[in-house]
């Protein structure tokens, strides 16, 4: 019988035998015995349910889904019913061309998603009235928290007070609290409708419209805050902004929020794209990824990530934020919703929502005067009964307190829904009002009505037919290289199969259409799935408790470090504030440590790439009483199983510190070693690496945090409960994509998971063995073996022949490949992670391409082709350049366009040539350029 594991794992038994022979082993068991150090080796097997077939897993998921109850949600609070246009659902959310892509670090093969993200940024800047928006945040709560730190950095005020208006979503306040405390920021929640602003504060957070639904004119508060030297963040609803004055027009410095209601399903809390926008002058302190316009080697306009020097990879503990994986796939969906509807379509949707809310209010007679979509009703002593009555008829309202209910309308609200609400309140149905002629904006006060235009760029005014939209999506997808074209051997990123069976349940209504704050009875299936998944992850990692709340690896890191900090404090150890981090660590590690209020002390690596244990001793001694933790990646970021790990853990524990193991590389451990049992106290995992959630072009992700028992009480909790220490706006973070990892674990079973690890290690060693004679493999562990990835050292080649790591990466595009990870963790190198999912044909195709490129380098070395004018330095070559009437290069066109091994019939042509990043940073353009900018090309 064909098992799912045999579909997930690329090389079959014969291919594995061939690969084993090439590296000199008789079996995978022999290989793993040699590769994995005995001190960490787990031989107890995994206590997980045996593998289910694809059909069985789907049936079980259907049963779980069936325990969720889809209702009509009028709870609001930042999460709304929305209609995902089917053309976008099928051709973005459900399309591997979009969901299997990686973060666009290789911009020449990512022009499609970069254009979609530029549309997203343009949509956000237009609607918020601010100068620059980034390419998505993790959710509204974290966007608000990042806004707070932008204000902190930009304000010259020495005050540590950040004022938050009381009419702000509870979950936003919770995330702000978590993030403020370790940074020494004092959060002051004030009801600014009645209380005055303090004299001294560095920033102010206002919500617009407020959590109560009230649409207040914030211009006076903004002015006062500015007079006192503070910056102002306005958390604004993008749909409302089509009708009301933009934050930028009332003087806001920063706008933050979510784009969920632009066609992205609720998913029990996520994933959705948050947004963050800033006024002119603040763009260089804007965290997150920013897409900008630059030009390629032929002078054509091209997109790429701008201001990369701000990234945590480079700035480490000086980074402005730890955000890495964001929410690209969802940002693409939201931007396409705006492209599809256009400015007048969006305005129509907003007017319809507003009209419903106005009609709702006519029945409830709440006396509300200014609102957009949400009405607050006082029903002294009856609130619970009203909410229960509506729930009984399938409509969920928000219980504020014993006397108060809020009701939110959205794009999906019908007259019948309103009737249920009126009945629940026991009020008469108002007379049918027709279409409120001319009264579309009647509860938006005149002074708050939007008069400025938005989304005037042609892209938002062209693709309004379904045919047009379908073709636009196809055109953009065709420009990109994703896993549906070939392997993406990115070290540290684990680009493995995202199986269709794993993906399908994501768009089932029983998972997609559940509000995160729905009553427990609506989400029983979700709760059961989350509990099972957390239990399985605990079993795999050897930890005692897991939380799936963090919605990216970076957030898992922060949660884990905050748990350590709170643990020390709970024991009166306030002085433990030093976090040791090896020099080879991923940039997010240092950035997260700073956000958790820790001081980073770097520990060196020895010349074999291992943590230098002598330096570790010295640093421990120096910071003895202050040691909070060490944060190490295992296997190391060099892709090696370090035998010294047990020693390292013991040394840190003896000194009173905690051990954090970054589990992003868990693909090398599953079934063979358990961090929670080999000495670590806490880890985060990346479900979007090891556990098959697709990268989506740079998100979504899920970064569960896993801890041993003594830290379990410090895990993040439900943001709607007091003292939650929440790191995301919803209790289970990006719950909507958890079925993917659930299905993977369920279908692989313990043997399949263990086999996957072994084949991942086998594949990496096979690639290392095939390429070793052509490029030095930088680090290896026992017996010359690597773990699940290997680093190819190009520095000697660059030094001798001037061919750079960039040249090789771009030439790989001509050969039809996505480059490996460039210059991480070692500058001037390529890190290759093939994963278990690539079969032998693809592994060999990649190795052959790398070897052919090495021969091309030989031609440059031999002087056949000049340095600086050869197929490597001129790569990649576009179809336009290869077919141009003029050809001035010292090598034939066929060498440029059809290097060895390339199938002429199915060649992937990059749409642009090599992109000049520096030019774009000097001439920063982060919104859709006007069409005449392309003139003359
Ligand atoms: C990917 C990765 C991270 C960051 O994860 P995100 O989900 O992108 O935030 C952290 N550490 C290592 C070693 C990684 O490979």
Image (cartoon, helix red, strand yellow):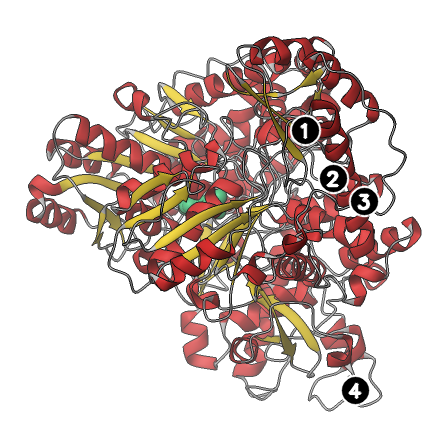
Q: Residue at x 66, y 11 (%)?
A: 67
Mark sitting on residue 439 = 3
Say whether disc 1 or disc 4 marks the residue closer to the N-terminus. Answer: 1
Q: Residue at x 72, y 33 (%)?
A: 357
Q: Nearer the viewer, mark 3 or mark 1?
A: 3
- Circle 4 SS class: loop
The front one of 278 and 270 is: 278
* Measured Cα–Cα span from mark 1 to mark 4: 47 Å
* Measured Cα–Cα span from mark 2 to mark 4: 45 Å
Q: Considering the image in quadrants, where does the C terminus appear? A: bottom right
Which of the 4 quarters of the picture holds residue 314? bottom left
Say whether disc 2 or disc 4 marks the residue closer to the N-terminus. Answer: 2
The front one of 605 and 692 is: 692
Mark sitting on residue 936 = 4
Say whether disc 3 or disc 2 marks the residue closer to the N-terminus. Answer: 2
- Neighbours of disc 3 within 10 Å: few (<14), some (14-19), many (20+): few
Q: Horizontal and vertical percent for residue 588?
A: 39, 50
* Measured Cα–Cα span from mark 1 to mark 2: 38 Å
């Amino acid at each position: 019988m064909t098992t799912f594991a045999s579909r997930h794992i690329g090389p079959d038994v014969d291919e594995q035998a061939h690969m084993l022979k090439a590296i000199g082993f008789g079996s995978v068991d022999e290989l793993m015995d040699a590769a994995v150090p005995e001190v960490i080796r787990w031989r107890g097997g995994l206590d997980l349910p045996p593998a289910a077939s694809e059909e069985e897993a789907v049936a079980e998921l259907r049963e779980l889904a069936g325990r969720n109850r889809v209702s009509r949600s009028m709870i609001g609070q930042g999460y709304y019913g929305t209609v995902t246009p089917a053309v976008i659902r099928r051709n973005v959310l459900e399309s591997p061309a979009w969901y299997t892509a990686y973060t666009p670090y290789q911009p020449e093969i990512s022009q499609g998603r970069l254009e979609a993200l530029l549309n997203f940024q343009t949509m956000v800047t237009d609607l918020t009235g601010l100068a620059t928006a980034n390419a998505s945040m993790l959710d509204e709560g974290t966007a608000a928290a990042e806004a707070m730190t932008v204000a902190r950095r930009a304000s010259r005020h020495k005050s540590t007070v950040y004022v938050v208006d009381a009419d702000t979503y509870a979950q936003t306040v919770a995330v702000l609290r978590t993030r403020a405390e370790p940074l020494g920021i004092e959060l002051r929640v004030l009801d600014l409708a009645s209380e005055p602003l303090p004299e001294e504060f560095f920033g102010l957070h206002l919500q617009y419209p407020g959590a109560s639904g009230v649409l207040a004119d914030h211009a006076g508060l903004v002015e006062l805050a500015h007079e006192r030297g503070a910056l102002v963040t306005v958390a604004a609803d993008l749909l409302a902004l089509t009708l009301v004055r933009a934050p930028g027009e009332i003087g806001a410095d920063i706008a933050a929020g979510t784009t969920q209601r632009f066609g992205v399903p609720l998913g029990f809390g996520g994933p959705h794209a948050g947004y963050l926008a800033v006024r002119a002058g603040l763009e260089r302190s804007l965290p997150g990824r920013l897409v900008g316009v630059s030009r390629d080697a032929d002078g054509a306009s091209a997109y790429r990530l701008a201001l990369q020097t701000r990234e945590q990879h480079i700035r480490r503990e000086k980074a402005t934020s730890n955000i890495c994986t964001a929410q690209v796939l969802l940002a693409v969906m939201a931007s396409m919703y705006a492209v599809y509807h256009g400015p007048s379509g969006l305005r129509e949707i907003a007017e319809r929502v507003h009209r419903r809310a106005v009609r709702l209010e006519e029945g409830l007679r709440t006396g509300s005067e200014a609102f957009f979509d949400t009405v607050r009703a006082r029903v002294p002593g009856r609130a619970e009964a009203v909410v229960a009555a509506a729930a009984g008829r399938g409509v969920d309202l928000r219980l504020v307190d014993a006397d108060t209910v809020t009701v939110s309308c959205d794009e999906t609200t019908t007259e019948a829904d309103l009737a249920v609400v009126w009945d629940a309140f026991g009020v008469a149905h108002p007379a049918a009002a027709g279409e409120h002629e001319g009264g579309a904006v009647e509860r938006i006060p005149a002074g708050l009505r939007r008069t400025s235009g938005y989304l005037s760029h042609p892209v938002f005014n062209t693709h309004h037919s379904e045919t047009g939209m379908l073709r636009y999506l196809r055109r953009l997808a065709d420009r990109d290289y994703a896993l549906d074209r070939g392997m993406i051997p990115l070290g540290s990123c684990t680009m493995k199969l995202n199986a269709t069976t794993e993906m399908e349940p994501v768009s089932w209504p029983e998972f997609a259409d559940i509000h995160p704050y729905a009553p427990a009875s609506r989400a029983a299936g979700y709760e059961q799935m989350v509990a099972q998944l957390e239990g399985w992850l605990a079993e795999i990692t050897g930890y005692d408790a897991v939380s799936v709340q963090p919605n990216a690896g970076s957030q898992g890191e922060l949660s884990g470090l905050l748990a350590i900090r709170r643990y020390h404090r709970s024991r009166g150890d306030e002085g433990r504030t030093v976090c040791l981090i090896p020099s080879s660590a991923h940039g997010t590690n240092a950035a997260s440590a700073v956000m958790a209020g820790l001081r980073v002390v770097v520990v060196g690596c020895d010349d074999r790439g291992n943590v230098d244990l002598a330096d570790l001793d010295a640093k421990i001694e120096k910071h003895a009483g202050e040691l909070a933790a060490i944060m190490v990646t295992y296997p190391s970021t060099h892709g090696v199983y370090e035998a010294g790990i047990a020693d390292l853990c013991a040394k840190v524990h003896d000194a009173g510190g905690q051990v954090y193991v970054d589990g992003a590389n868990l693909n090398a451990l599953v079934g063979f070693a358990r961090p929670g049992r080999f000495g670590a106290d806490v880890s985060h995992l990346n479900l979007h690496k090891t556990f098959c959630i697709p990268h989506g072009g740079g998100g979504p992700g899920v970064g569960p945090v896993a801890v041993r028992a003594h830290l379990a009480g410090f895990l993040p909790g439900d943001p709607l409960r007091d003292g939650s220490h929440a790191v995301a706006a919803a209790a289970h973070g990006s719950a909507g994509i958890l079925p993917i990892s659930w299905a993977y674990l369920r279908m692989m079973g313990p043997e399949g998971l263990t086999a996957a690890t072994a084949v991942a290690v086998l594949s990496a060693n096979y690639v290392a063995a095939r390429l070793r004679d052509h490029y030095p493999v930088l680090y290896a562990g026992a017996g010359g073996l690597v773990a699940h990835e290997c680093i190819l050292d190009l520095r000697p080649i660059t030094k001798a022949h001037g061919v750079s790591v960039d040249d090789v990466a771009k030439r790989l595009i001509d050969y039809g490949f996505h480059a490996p990870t460039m210059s991480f963790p070692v500058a001037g190198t390529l890190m290759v992670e093939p994963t278990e999912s690539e079969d032998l044909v693809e592994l060999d195709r990649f190795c052959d391409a790398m070897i052919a490129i090495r021969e091309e380098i030989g031609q440059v070395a031999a002087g056949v082709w000049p340095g600086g004018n050869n197929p490597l330095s001129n790569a990649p070559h576009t179809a336009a350049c290869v077919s141009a009437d003029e050809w001035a290069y010292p090598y034939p066109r066929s060498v440029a366009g059809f290097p060895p091994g390339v199938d002429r019939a199915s060649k992937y042509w990059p749409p642009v040539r090599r992109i000049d990043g520096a030019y774009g940073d000097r001439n920063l353009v982060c919104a859709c350029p006007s069409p005449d900018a392309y003139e003359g090309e």
